[in-house]
Amino acid sequence: MNKVDEYVNNLEAIRKERCGLVIDYIRTTYPDVEETITFSPKTTFPVFKKGDIYVGIGSMKGHISIHFAKQEATKIVAEDNPKIKAMVGCVNIKDTVTFPLEKIKNAIDYCFKFVISTVDEYILQFSSDVQTILQAVRTVVKESAPMVEEKISYQMPTFVVHGNLVYFAAYTKHIGFYPGASVINAFQNRLTEYKFSKGAIQFPIEKPLPYEFIREMIQFKVEESIKKAEGKKKKR
């Protein structure tokens, strides 16, 4: 018996059944995913991974918590059901709530069936209008940092110069731009018309994106990344 099965066998009956249903579906439908046990200071639970995409399922007091690498997957599970608590990256399903197994299966499929491996693949999954915006942002990044390398990380286009420089992603109503906390701090006074957090900015899709402003932020981050890399060299 492996560690995932040991974990499930030690659960209370209702959560043992529910976790088992989810795990059986993942194992049957996606036999190539890696399964492991994640340990943290507060909890331990099974995690299934395919590249940098994961689905985790854990038993908590009175509920099951399902964690998804793709935020949209949480919406699939919680859609039209106010009794299911959706948070960033996970959903909590109480023991007293009808278990939405089919929606959970759809969310798992959303995570594992379409794993993006290139920036081109990422952009092509959207409508032509959104593709145009994403290509424009991509062009600005490349023009601002000619030495940049592209990759997919956390299923988002990621650009690398001495470490991760910026990420971007498309959502239903906005383009998420992720330059990091230092850029947000440096340009905070010019971000008042946008939603932003510690390391992210939301640009509404229905409005023209401020490409020159994006260029400024990228150039700032490039200079910062180069200085950090040079500082590390001097310490050696």
Image: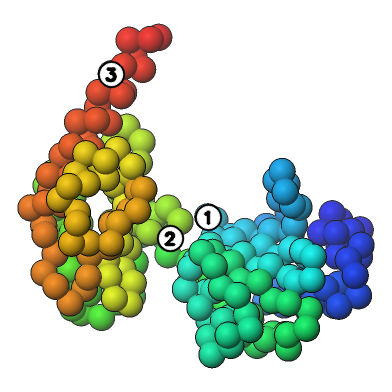
**Mark number, residue 230:** 3
Q: What residue is shown at x 15% (from left), y 39% (from top)? A: 219
Image quadrant occupied by the N terminus = bottom right
Q: What residue is shown at x 69% (from left), y 58% (from top)? A: 47
**Mark number, residue 52:** 1
Q: What residue is shown at x 27% (from left), y 31% (from top)? A: 225
Chain-order first, disc 3 or disc 1: 1
Q: Amino acid at mark 1?
A: Asp
Instruction: For marks 2 and 3, give the CA distance.
Output: 30 Å
Quadrant location of residue 29? bottom right
Q: Residue 4: x percent and y percent? A: 81, 59
Query: Is the Cβ of the residue at disc 3 closer than 8 Å to that at disc 1?
Result: no
For residue 205, above or below residue 59: below
Query: Is the Cβ of the residue at disc 1 closer than 8 Å to that at disc 2?
Result: yes
Left or right placement of residue 17 versus residue 190 in this view: right
- Regarding mark 3 in the picture, which secondary structure is present there? helix
